[in-house]
Amino acid sequence: MGTIEEDCMGESERREAFHENDRQLSVAQADSTPRLLLNRGHTSSAQIPRDGRVSPGSQGHDLRGARMLLVEQASLSQSRKTWRKKMDFLLSVIGYAVDLGNVWRFPYICYQNGGGAFLLPYLLMALFGGVPLFYMELALGQFHQSGCISIWKHICPIFKGIGFSICVIGLYIAFYYNTVMAWAMYYLLSSFQTTLPWATCFNTWNTANCTHLTPGNPNTSWTNGSTSPAEEFYIRHILQLHLSPGLHELGAVNWQLALCLLLIFTVVYFSIWKGVKTSGKVVWLTATLPYLVLLVLLIRGATLPGAWRGVVYYLKPDWWKLLSTTVWVDAAVQIFFSLGPGFGVLLALASYNPFHNNCYKDALLTSSINCLTSMLSGLVIFTVLGYMAEVRQQGVDAVARDIGPSLLFIICAEAIASMPAANFFAIIFFLMIITLGLDSTFAGLEGLITAMLDEYPQVLGRRREWVVLGLVCLCYLGALSTVCYGGAYIVKLLEEYATGPALIAVVFLEIAAVSWFYGTSRFCRDVQVMLGFLPGQFWRVCWRAICPCFLLFILGSFLASPLEIKLFGYLYPPWSAILGYIIGASPLICVPCYMVYYLLSTRGTFRQVSESREKFNSRIKGDPTPRKKPVCHNDLKR
């Protein structure tokens, strides 16, 4: 049984040499020079210099060895599908990164933390924290062509538990994220009625407090006890929260929402069941439609009375707020969850790229589009908020008190209902919400599916359709609790605890394993083999030092401020915090459990695992113990 450090070294060096030999063998075949083919057929991984170039070897000059090398290399990727077009990949990554949080969270965080002044810490956190993590995951997935579990056998097997942790987090997200799209689906179907049901107070679910305001109507006024038709439609008709006393008693399943959720998962299944060949086609619609709708809504919103009040409120800088630590914490949290490293998605999507695809440009392009989309969404949302402030005769801050789904399903829905051609704008708006969510769901489930298929290829490799069906059914059953009468309480609980400190801790362990155990220099040489150039010193410093500090900064802010969850006036009971911490900690258990398993099943002491790779390499030189796997091309001759 080989040592842990040998496993961490061997797989990467072998794969690096295979890919370099593939490039040089292709050149040799194009030159039609058999002698050159033979000379380049057996370059040992030990012969690869630090600049990543492979010189012609002096041993193993036989055609049989070259053929064996090609067969071994082909076995690494012969069954792996690739994207049909480069744009399929780019749109999938953009669709994943640009999600509902860009629409409902960023505008609120921006105006709350200094308006235009917030863009400074936001861009700095993106430059030094978010984009380097984004780039690292794309490069790792593309180089090793593996999902979030099996990739660790190429990097350092003792950290394989990180992959299982990512899968648990992904399941938690799938249990509640699609419910938001089910709400939007109900709104979309309701938009085809002659009169929008959230536009009037004459429905069975409305109360005496329902107040319908219209522009220029002096006969009605807004008071502290007033509720809008849109608010009562959302809370009393869609969620039906009044039928549930709280988290302790969720009540029965809302069958209308259950059917909408089933429709969402049906669309998801038939979009990803065949892999990137089908999902790559679907994202051409789901990833581009939101931009068209945002542009239409921006043009319409700019013509509404009071719209520019909202835009000024959104962008007017308050530079003094930059002295507050909260602003920098919010900027770091927003860019981290917006770009989405640590969910296993970027690893999975990049693993279907051609080996020499320029993932560096892809990382810069997609992360820039993500940031610009957040700013564009803010303009759209605040033109609507300015309009609603004009209608209610209130300040923009009073209208913009809501964050999360309420901003979309109450404030925006109410504004749309008072516009001319309300049905048209309602249809395109909620269709945009659904497509934004679908892209993220496609990518999130693809991350889980790729992880399982890569880790268990013998069992699941040829049963992708059944694996996808089983996963979709599991997610649907897990999500049924979120479409009960008190299901919104579950959604809020999972949103706060399932993707908070646990995810940040997982990403910290991931970058620590890559930068400190695998080694930044080795990772940069991997990138050089793929792209033909070494990452600059800026990226090395970010991966080695700045990104870990960035993640610890976010993690510390989460742990330092205890959560107090409220939803529409309902204060969560104390025991819900314990339940939330159990949910948040459960993914992390996978990491130490797998470490213990690996230490017990692998030769090597804990000291050997902990000490530096260079020191251990020098100590094991001359070790006659055979390795578990061949790590250089000369091993293939035998």
Image (cartoon, rainbow, N blue to C red):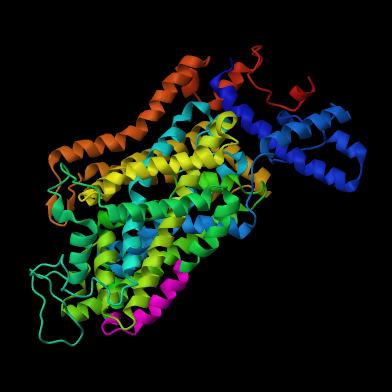
Please tell me which residue lies in front, 509 or 305. Answer: 305
Does 205 appear above or below 328?
Answer: below
Q: Could you tell me if residue 512 is visible in this image?
A: yes
Name the quadrant containing residue 68.
top right
Q: Is residue 637 left or right of residue 397?
A: right
Does 313 appear above or below 44?
Answer: below
User: Residue 464: where, in percent of width, then height?
Assistant: 55, 40
Q: Residue at x 86, y 34 (%)?
A: 39
Q: Residue at x 78, y 35 (%)?
A: 70
Q: Could you tell me if residue 333 is visible in this image?
A: no
User: Residue 417: where, in percent of width, then height?
Assistant: 27, 76
The residues colored magenta run 290-308
Quadrant where the N terminus lies?
Answer: top right
Q: Is residue 461 left or right of residue 75?
A: left
User: Residue 101: where, in percent of width, then height?
Assistant: 36, 58
Q: Is residue 147 left or right of residue 101?
A: right
Please tell me which residue lies in front, 538 or 159. Answer: 159
Overall secondary structure of the magenta section: helix
The total of numbered circles placed on residues is 0
Please tell me which residue lies in front, 128 or 426. Answer: 426
User: Residue 117: where, in percent of width, then height?
Assistant: 32, 67
Q: Is residue 25 magenta?
A: no
Quadrant where the C terminus lies?
Answer: top right
**Residue most extreme to the top:** 624
Does 198 appear above or below 264?
Answer: below
